[in-house]
Image (cartoon, grey):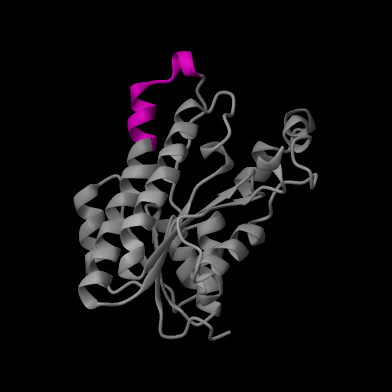
Amino acid sequence: MGKFTGRRALVTGAGDGIGREIAVRLLEMGAEVFALSKTASHLESLKTEYPSIQIICVNLSDWNAAREVVQKITPIHFLVNNAACTSLQPFLTATPESFDELFSVNVKAVMNVSQVVAGDLIARGQKGAIINLSSQAGQSALKDHTVYCASKGALNMLTKVMALELGPKGIRVNAVCPTVVMTTMGRKAWSDPAKAAPMLARIPQGRFAEVSDVVNAAVYLLSEESDMVNGHLLAVDGGYSAV
């Protein structure tokens, strides 16, 4: 409690799932939190439960609209680029529409929002931290995830370049790369034992990640305890990437 008092945080994709829980945790730790989502009903639910959270409804695929709303709430000391979308398509039938949609949200929007936040901090001479929510899919190929894997791989490299260029300005940039996460959607998608078994067999800890596992990693990367961690892709995968 109070650890992030005096800091302003922006979490994208904060209407539900991992983003919502990160926003709530940062609020509980004293930060002034801005929750961004394209789904108004999700934001209204969050606001009802946590009235002090400030909500922003915008579609991150709209470059100019997203840029304008973020500029209005600066300075932002902690940015969590959590918003993402997915599409399950094998390589031979992956569509250009899917490619454009996923790269627009999973990569381009991250660059856009981060440019605004980081540029403002640099102009003010202030330090900050940025986290990009990536995935084990950015480093390990998953069948039928052609475009999703490609977008997360691109996000990982974007993270490293951001860390390289922004680190000297006092802004650390890292990525969190979880395995399957047991959000409401995750539980539905992976409830079939036949589907889950092959993936679980590759995870030494024998389970999928809980939302709290990802939230804890995000809080660590934002905190002063990780002050020398920059440009890192933090696997929250129970050892999946080690085997």
Magenta span covers which residues? 91-102
Residue 169 lies left or right of residue 150; in this view the side is left
Residue at 34%, 23% in the rendered image = 96
Residue at 75% over, 41% down: 203
Give the answer, above or below, for where 26 lies relative to 194: below
Image quarter where the N terminus lies is: bottom right
Residue 190 screen position, x and y as percent: 69, 37
Left or right: 33 as drawn, with respect to 223:
left
Q: Is residue 211 magenta?
A: no
Residue drawn at x 55%, y 23% as measured from the top left: 144
Quarter of image, res 34: bottom left
State whether residue 78 appears in this view.
no
Q: Nearer the viewer, residue 54 or 233?
A: 233
Number of numbered discs = 0
Residue 121 x %, y %: 27, 71
**x, y (%) of residue 6?**
41, 85
Instruction: Using the rendered image of the protein, determine whether residue 8 is visible from the camera's viewpoint.
Output: yes
Q: Residue furthest top?
A: 92
- Reply above or below: 228 against 135: below
Q: Quadrant of residue 125?
A: bottom left
What is the chief secondary structure element of the magenta stretch? helix
Q: Nearer the viewer, residue 129 or 49?
A: 129
Residue 94 covered by magenta stretch: yes
Q: Position of residue 107 (x, y in %)?
A: 36, 43
Q: Residue at x 23, y 48 (%)?
A: 63
Which quadrant holds the C terminus?
top right
Foreground residue among 164 and 102? 164
